[in-house]
Image (tube, rainbow, N blue to C red):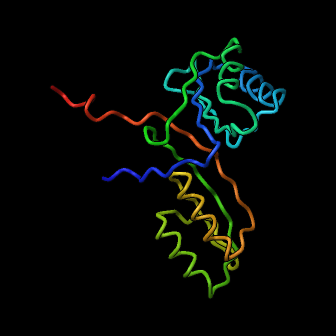
Amino acid sequence: MAADPVPAGPVGHHVLSVLVENRSGVLSRVANLFARRGFNIVSLAVAPTEDDAFSRITIVVDVESAPLEQIVKQLNKLVNVVEISELDPRRSVERELMLATVEATPEERGRVVELVQIFEGRILAVTHTEITVSLEGHPSKVDDFEEMLRVYGIRDLQRTGRVALPRLDAAATRPT
């Protein structure tokens, strides 16, 4: 299976993967740091890792609001932060999930269903006038799908925010 194409990220956006202790209040401290410093968060996703003692926070940061080095220095000062790494879009795997409820008359429903199939999404619920769909993929794919759905009228929309991990090095994982 071919890997997704890796589009360049928006200018001024950087993806940070922050490994933190899985403790109460850590996310609040990270968010407060950004708010106090006036750093703009474009996307934020957090969940436990394979080790229940840690969580991974994926933060997409607008570095036009502050230099990246300053953001990393401030994050490193937080007690519960274990590791911070910037993920290069060319060397990482990024995904996002979107749920959307779209207005779709019986005449339009076939076109919406076809669009969902083209983008390899899923239909989650259908009524006489609406369809709820989901799509998982690279954020640029999700952006494109959302734009195409707008023609029909989006009633409700929720996106998870980006999650990302470093891309595996195929050469390093081959047996010798």
The percent coordinates of residue 51 (x first, y second) are: 51, 21
Q: Nearer the viewer, residue 6 or 115?
A: 6
- Reply above or below: 44 against 79: below
Q: Nearer the viewer, residue 173 or 13?
A: 13
Q: Residue at x 56, y 40 (%)?
A: 163
Q: Is residue 138 left or right of residue 171?
A: right
- Reply above or below: 69 against 40: above
- Residue pushed farthest top? 79
Q: Residue at x 60, y 34 (%)?
A: 58
Q: Is residue 39 left or right of residue 48?
A: right
Q: Residue at x 69, y 54 (%)?
A: 158
The percent coordinates of residue 162 (x first, y second) are: 59, 43
The percent coordinates of residue 69 (x first, y second) are: 65, 24
Q: Nearer the viewer, residue 52 or 135?
A: 135
**Res. 98 image quadrant:** bottom right
Q: Residue at x 64, y 35 (%)?
A: 59
